[in-house]
Image: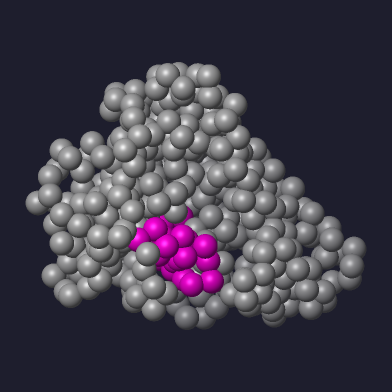
Amino acid sequence: MYEFSTIGALAGLVLAIVLIILHFQPAYSLILGAFVGAIAGGGGLSEAVNAMISGASGMISSILRIMTSGILAGALIKTGSAQKIATSIAKRMGSRFALPAISIATMIICFAGVFVDISVITVAPIALAIGRETRLSKESLLVAMTGGGKAGNIISPNPNTIATAEAFGVDLTALMLKNIIPALCALAATIALSMLLSKKQGIPVGETDSESGSADLPGFVPAILGPATAIALLALRPIAGISVDPLIALPAGGLVCILATRHGKEIREISEAGLSKVIGVSVLLVGTGTIAGVIKASALQSDMTALLERLSMPTFELAPLAGILMAAATASTTAGATIASQTFAETLVTQGVPPLSAGAMIHSGSTVLDSLPHGSFFHATGGSVSLQIKDRMRLIPYEACIGLTATAASIVLYLVSA
């Protein structure tokens, strides 16, 4: 296969970033960036197209799993199960532990298979209601939710985890389990930082903010039964040696959720709603695959390895650095983890880094700078609590600290086991 120059590949990536910042459609921005990167990297039209198609085709299995996971996500949201889980946790922990309750609720919903931004949007009305009663600021509430979401995201069967597991050829459940300690460390950092923010003067929750819905919610047991089923099916491989692919486990959990909450008659509407939640990510991954294909076919991998050796840095540090940089470039955990994994998986494994550890470090690293303003996560989460852009930007360092905590824990785990 033709090898593109590092400068050309990076130029294409920079172009894609600029277009995304200018609010061009992200998938098209990535595709155009991939094409320009291949041409600028010295390739011809045929080489550019072949590299882009090769990269996109490598994403098909991940996209299929992500599309079927939409049934679980749609079921949790449309049946009210996600809101019931969040409400139950908040009530059990009480107003004294409001911020830890909000963080844990968001973490569990994201862990159950709901996307991180949707998890925050789901918990936001409950958080605002609690904040109104306990006089907490919007900033502390949002950090509690986004940090909890980051913690849940690295141990969830979400698109970023699926894509990373696919790239390294490791079991999805094993990758989820690998980051449990980093997730708990991130949760602890989230609680500490959100409580620190609560002691500072911030924007109070106003009376005009929307309150949580009063629609009938299912019981806690039916609400948790669906995600519990999905996790149990995925856990059969490490526990009993029975492999149940996420392509089966995740929609099965969704169907159990629909039936347990007595929404069987609405299965068509719930499935359509679930698909609408994942179709954007699926299309994004096609664009991500094209630029990952060009970067993978460039000299970037060997140049990065050589640079690390010149700086006397161990090769394993390429994993968290790649996750951090690629997620910052795309302002997306999914795109960042996917590009980093697709690009550097072979190099890391060849250099002796265990695939599971490398995937875990990339995955946790992709949560550090995924909330930059050129991504949808920044705006969706800020909008969930009606926070102005300038106020939302002040929270980025706090979120980066939470992601760095998870990344540092993941690195320490690797070093201890090495």
Q: In the figure, 217 relative to 163: above or below?
A: above
Coloring scheme used: one colour
Whole-percent x, y for residue 38 in the image: 78, 70
Q: Quadrant of the N terminus?
A: bottom right
The answer to whether 126 appears left or right of 121 in the picture is left
Q: Residue furthest left?
A: 96
- In depth, the one of 227 and 249 nearer the eye is 227
The answer to whether 206 appears left or right of 22 in the picture is left
Q: Can residue 63 be seen by looking at this rendering?
A: yes
Whole-percent x, y for residue 371 in the image: 44, 66
Q: Which residues are magenta?
A: 361-385
Whole-percent x, y for residue 153 in the image: 41, 49
Q: Residue furthest front?
A: 208
Exactly how many numbered labels are in the figure? Answer: 0
Q: Residue at x 24, y 51 (%)?
A: 129
Q: Residue at x 44, y 42 (%)?
A: 114
Q: Residue at x 38, y 52 (%)?
A: 120
Q: Residue at x 42, y 62 (%)?
A: 383
- In depth, the one of 201 and 37 nearer the eye is 201
Q: Can residue 178 be seen by looking at this rendering?
A: no
Q: In the figure, 65 relative to 334: above or below?
A: above
Q: Is residue 365 magenta?
A: yes
The answer to whether 243 appears left or right of 298 in the picture is left
Q: Is residue 92 magenta?
A: no
Whole-percent x, y for residue 275 in the image: 60, 39
Q: Where, by quadrant of the figure, is residue 2 drawn?
A: bottom right
- In depth, the one of 202 and 340 nearer the eye is 202
